Amino acid sequence: MSYFFHILYSNVIPLCTMILIGAVLRRAFDLDIKTLSKLNFYIFSPALVFKMLYESIISGSVLMQVLLYFFVSMALLVVVIEITMRIRRYKAGMRSAMRNSVIFYNSANYAIPLNQLVFVGDAFTMSIQIIIMMMQSLLPNTYGIYSVNAHKGSLRSTLRTIFSMPTIYAIPLAFLLRGFAIPIPQPIYISLDYVTDAFIATALITLGVQLGGMKWKIKFPDVLISNFLRLLIGPIIGFLVVLMLGIDGLMAKALILSSAVPTSLNSVLLAVEFDNEPEFASQAILASTIFSIFTVTMVIYLLQFIE
């Protein structure tokens, strides 16, 4: 029960508070959500990814194991999603929105503090979560952009959009500078701190602005299907993959926990930026964040039985 209240108090209530502020601002000032989404995609998100990777200490063996887990679990999750969408007979736009709401999960501002809580600030489990965060930052800026644009434009224009995303350059640059121990000048690093500190607030306010401008025609049962796949099927697949790959101990627990978190803000940012089912995406992330109070608590409880 203490986990339940800690997650509620430390994660869900602060997230919902910022979302509420965004909704109020939308009603009061009619904010331009396209501008907010561009700030997130082109400034705040790549800065956060770069800074966390630059400061992290990740061994090659851990990197390879986590990447193998990530790709196998993601492939299995995509299979489940595709089967579900065929049964539901979704159109192209809704297919990409549903897929994004499940495979993109909140690996940064939800999963990182959660990892610190559950594993008491363990450096090893945090390095695992940072690798997951890296991949969850790269996917929306590559595959995510492709999925929401493939049915609307040419491959050439979609690729041009993907290669305009700063995040895909921030990741190799961070590894390069860290690998060669190249220091970042102090004035630039201070500016980087300012930008990364603003990421979470700006992303959550963007979600609130989107929610505040909606007509609120609730998209049931699609939102519940998305939440079920993200919050329940996600960690179940994570558990099966660690068994399949023979991963155990702290690494297994950290990987399973990383797969149990709610839908990422990136799914909303993609939906808003490229006008692809923004109402569904916003409702899916809000609902999954609330339901995660119960599902994440359950996953944390079950982790004690993994050796």
Image (cartoon, grey):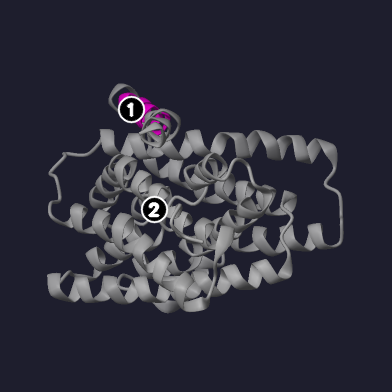
Q: Amino acid at mark 1?
A: Leu
Which of the 4 image quadrants contains residue 134?
bottom right
Kindly state the secondary structure of the residue where label 2 is placed.
helix
Q: Is residue 250 left or right of residue 10?
A: right
Residue that mark 2 sits on: 302
| Residue 66 can be seen, yes or no | yes
Q: Is residue 62 left or right of residue 219?
A: right
Q: Is residue 102 left or right of residue 113?
A: left
247 and 132: which is toward the camera: 247
- For the N terminus, which image quadrant? top left
On screen, residue 302 above or below 239 = above
- Residue 86's label in the rendered image is none
**Span colored in magenta:** 14-24
Q: Residue 184: percent from the left, percent from the top?
A: 83, 47
155 and 286: which is toward the camera: 286
12 and 152: which is toward the camera: 12
Q: Residue at x 26, y 44 (%)?
A: 287
Kindly state the secondary structure of the residue where label 1 is placed.
helix
Q: Amino acid at mark 2?
A: Leu
Q: Residues within 10 Å of mark 2 (few under 14, many from 20)?
A: few
| Residue 150 can be seen, yes or no | no
Q: Is residue 105 magenta?
A: no
Q: Residue 130: percent from the left, percent from the top?
A: 61, 54
Q: Residue at x 47, y 60 (%)?
A: 306
Q: Residue at x 28, y 43 (%)?
A: 291
Residue that mark 1 sits on: 20
Please count the marks in the image: 2
Q: Residue 50: percent from the left, percent from the top?
A: 67, 52
Q: Main secondary structure of the magenta part?
A: helix
Q: Is residue 16 magenta?
A: yes
Q: Residues within 10 Å of mark 1 (few under 14, many from 20)?
A: some
